[in-house]
Amino acid sequence: ASEFWLPSDKELSITEIIKSFNVNMDGITDEALKADDPQVRQAVVEFNEGSFSQSGLEQFQKKYGLRVDPVTKVVGTEETEESNGEADLDVQTLTAMAQGAQTWSFVFDSTASWIDVVETILKNKDSPRLISCCWSAVESTMGRSAVLAATTQFLKLGLAGYTWLNDAGDAGPVLNP
């Protein structure tokens, strides 16, 4: 079972969780953040066979008084009870931020490139249009042609109407080669 990424002795509301990330929530209520439309879908991208724990997600949601929403579809490696803490964090954060949204998980092995990722998303015609990924590669180690190929893939997603959210990864932002 996974550990919770947000320690607390009390139940937190959605807005309290979001505020913990230093986001201004003035005028936004918990009810406004709940999505009950089945067309509201989001996805997380994981690498290195990074899997989340469905039961750990449910425990997290119950502990913080959140709506219990399981990940509805896994593309790639199925989730197991032997979870990856990074993947748990990603799924817990995403489902806490948009309760009621259908959440998918795209899981790739360590050999997958950004080209593989984008092509997989685009091949799944019903893929969620919001994709979140906290994994990254250090561009300076990728080489210019790989960076340009990845950039082209992300442009394809944008032109197809997808929103891709990515953080800088553990290495932080690095300059393009």
Image: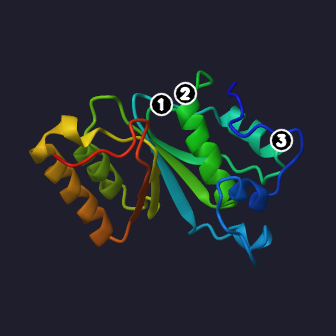
Mark 3 is on which residue type?
Answer: Lys
Quadrant of the rendered image containing residue 101: bottom right
Classify mark 3: residues with Cα within 10 Å, few (<14), some (14-19) or many (20+). Answer: some
Q: Nearer the viewer, residue 64 or 119?
A: 64
Going from N to C along the chain, the mark reached first, 3 or 1, is 1
Describe residue 111's horizontal placement relative to residue 170 as left or right. Answer: left
Image mark for residue 63: 3
Residue type, label 1: Gly
For label 2, count other residues whose C-alpha is less than 10 Å away and answer few (under 14), some (14-19) or many (20+). Answer: some
Q: Element at badge 3? A: helix
Residue 14 in the image, given as x and y percentages of width and height: 76, 58
**Residue labelled with disc 2:** 84
What amino acid does circle 2 point to?
Answer: Asn
Image coordinates for residue 126, horizontal then vertical, percent: 43, 61
Check disc 1 and report the residue beneath it: 50
Label 2 to label 3, Cα distance in Å?
A: 20 Å
Question: Crowdedness of circle 1 by 10 Å Cα count: few (<14), some, many (20+)?
Answer: many
Q: Which secondary structure lies at badge 1?
A: loop
Q: Residue at x 54, y 36 (%)?
A: 87
* Above or below 34: residue 131: above
Residue 161 numbered mark, or none: none
Mark 2 element type? loop
Distance (Cα) linking label 2 and label 1: 5 Å
**Res. 79 visible in picture:** no
